[in-house]
Image (cartoon, grey):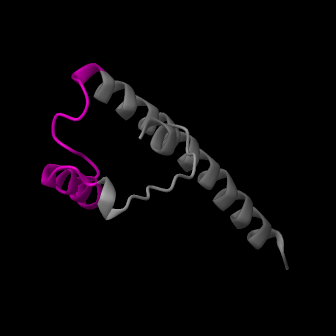
Amino acid sequence: MKKVGGEGKPTLFLFSDTEIKDESFIEDINMILSTGEVPNLFAADEKTEILEMMQTAVRVLVSIECVIFLSYMEVRTCVP
């Protein structure tokens, strides 16, 4: 989760039915896919670290999108 969310690395999660050792594993996977979180998966300090990484990544993306949008608007308004 740190690599995907915080570092933005593309990731594929693939598992087969032979890897399912316990039904609770399926429930955890379902929670990750539907809500993005599994209760008590991370300690409080790890969760805080992940949230901070995500907030930083979002701020960077938003600032990049703002620059792109403003550049687009500037070009659009300058074209006769």
Quadrant the C terminus occupies: bottom right
Is residue 38 part of the magenta span, yes or no? yes
What is the magenta range?
20-45
- Please name the residue shown 45% across and 32% down the image: 53
The x, y position of residue 61, in whole percent, is 56, 48
Q: Is residue 51 above or below residue 32?
A: above
Outermost residue to the bottom: 80
Residue with the most extreme right position: 80
Q: Nearest the camera: 80 or 30? A: 30
- Is 40 on the left or on the right of 57, as rendered? left
Q: Residue at x 79, y 67 (%)?
A: 75
Position of 17 with respect to 4 (left or right) is left
Name of the residue lying farthest toward the top? 45
| Residue at x 75% of width, y 72% of height | 76
Horizontal and vertical percent for residue 33? Answer: 30, 59
Farthest front residue in view: 18
Near-viewer residue (61 or 44)? 44
Q: Is residue 22 left or right of residue 54?
A: left
Q: Is residue 1 magenta?
A: no
* In the rendered image, the vertical position of residue 5 relative to residue 43, given as above or below: below
Q: Quadrant of residue 38?
A: top left
Up/down of 79 relative to 37, above or below: below
Res. 46 image quadrant: top left
Residue sitting nearer the eye, 13 or 56? 13
Could you say where residue 48 lies in the image, as x and y percent from the top left? 31, 26
- In which quadrant of the rendered image does the N terminus lie? top left
User: Image check: 48 left or right of 25?
Assistant: right
Please name whichever residue, 9 or 28, is drawn nearer the observer in this view of the structure: 28
| Percent of width and height locating residue 62 | 54, 49
